Each structure stands twice: as structure tokens, then as C-alpha cells.
Image (cartoon, rainbow, N blue to C red):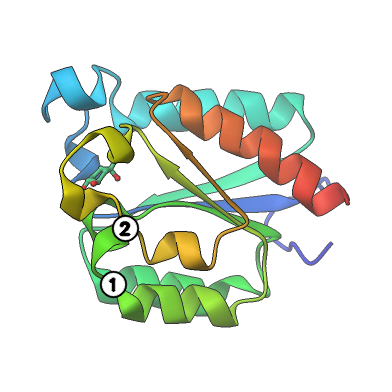
Amino acid sequence: MANTLNADDRPVILILNGPNLNMLGMREPSVYGSDTLGDIEAACAERAEAIGLAIDFRQSNYEGELIDWVHETAAQHDGIIINAGGLSHTSIALMDALRTCSLPIVEVHLSNVFGREAYRHHSYISLVASGVICGFGGHGYLLALEAMAKLINT
Ligand code: DQA
């Protein structure tokens, strides 16, 4: 495994969160639930440890910062879980960065984007992800970790 961030040799998964996800808990709770991003990070850290992974959990409202993090990731991480928020539906640049990083990618959305507005039905991230999990709220991140564990062990 390529990871360098943890001392105990667990694979490190970069969990990237895009614009507006810092507002979870306050943002449209009927759509996104009442968990904050901090709650989701804590749940991810716990599940990751239970299944032998470590996490590096980040959020940015800036497309360029997310792209910079993807560029830096190959040497530091073993996989990427990404909820790119609204950038999922618009960002060819973020897709291009992910395409070149050669790590397994799992896409997550809290909401079921396919049951929502038509402009949320297409995701550029899906074109480079191994799989997509959506509609299960914060629990989707835990499902993504399970999927990632399988991907990096096969
Ligand atoms: C989201 C779905 C996107 O369409 C939206 O722009 C978000 C959140 C989700 O997690 O359900 O910001 O990615």
C-alpha cells in the first residue's frame, strides 16, 4: 500500500467533500438529514478503524482546492471517496484530475440524486468512479468505506 499518513500501516482513504457540505445539519435537513459533517467524519473514523482503514477527511468550497488535493493524493492515499456536491454535475476539471490519479474512487451522495431535479441526474464524477452510493444519508459514507475496503483488497 502506498499510504504514508498513518503509523500503523493501515491503508489511508481520502474522503473529499465539496461545496456546501460544511453546512450539513443546517442545510435543507429534509433533504440532507440532521447530521453535521463532523458527525459523519466521526462515524467514518470509527467504521474505518473497525475494518482496517484510516481516513483523511476534508471539505472545501473551492473547486481548485479539491483539484490540488487530488493531485497530491497518489503518494499519500490508497483510495478516494468523494461527495463533490454540486460540482459533481458541472466539473469536468475535477473529473479530469480524478481520472489521472489512478486510485480507486467511490462516489457518494447523501440524497438520492436520481429522485431529484433532472440537472442532478448526471455526474461527471460517476464517469471515473468504480461505483456510486446515493440516497442513504450519512450512512452512505460508511457503505462507501466498506466498498473501498473490498476494492483495495482485490
Ligand atoms: C449532494 C447532491 C448534489 O446534487 C448537491 O449539489 C449537494 C449534495 C448530496 O450529497 O446529496 O451539494 O452531493
Residue occupying the point 58% across, 71% down: 73
* Quarter containing the N terminus: bottom right
| Residue 123 falls in image quadrant | bottom left
Q: Nearer the viewer, residue 119 or 68?
A: 119
Q: Quadrant of residue 79?
A: bottom right
Q: Is residue 13 left or right of residue 108?
A: right
User: Going by the image, does 80 lie left or right of 33?
Assistant: right
Residue 25 appearing in the image: no
Tell me the residue that label 2 is attached to.
122
Task: Name the one closer to the observer, 74 or 82.
Answer: 82
Identity, as a three-letter code, of the amino acid under mark 1: Ser
Q: Residues within 10 Å of mark 2 (few under 14, many from 20)?
A: some
Q: Residue 68: horizontal and vertical position, in percent?
A: 40, 77
Q: Which residue is mark 1?
A: 91
The structure residue drawn at horizontal position 65% and vertical position 67%, both measured from the top left corner, is 76
Q: Which mark is residue 132?
A: none
Position of 112 compared to 62: left or right? Answer: right
- The disc, 2 or 1, on the residue closer to the chain's N-terminal end is 1
Q: Is residue 35 above or below residue 38?
A: above
Q: Is residue 90 visible?
A: yes
Q: Is residue 74 above or below residue 125?
A: below
Q: CA distance from mark 2 to mark 1?
A: 11 Å
Closer to the camera, 127 or 100? 127
133 vs 38, left or right, is right
For label 1, the SS is loop
Say which of marks 2 and 1 sits in front: 2
The amino acid at mark 2 is His
Q: In the rendering, at what x and y percent does residue 103 appear?
A: 67, 67
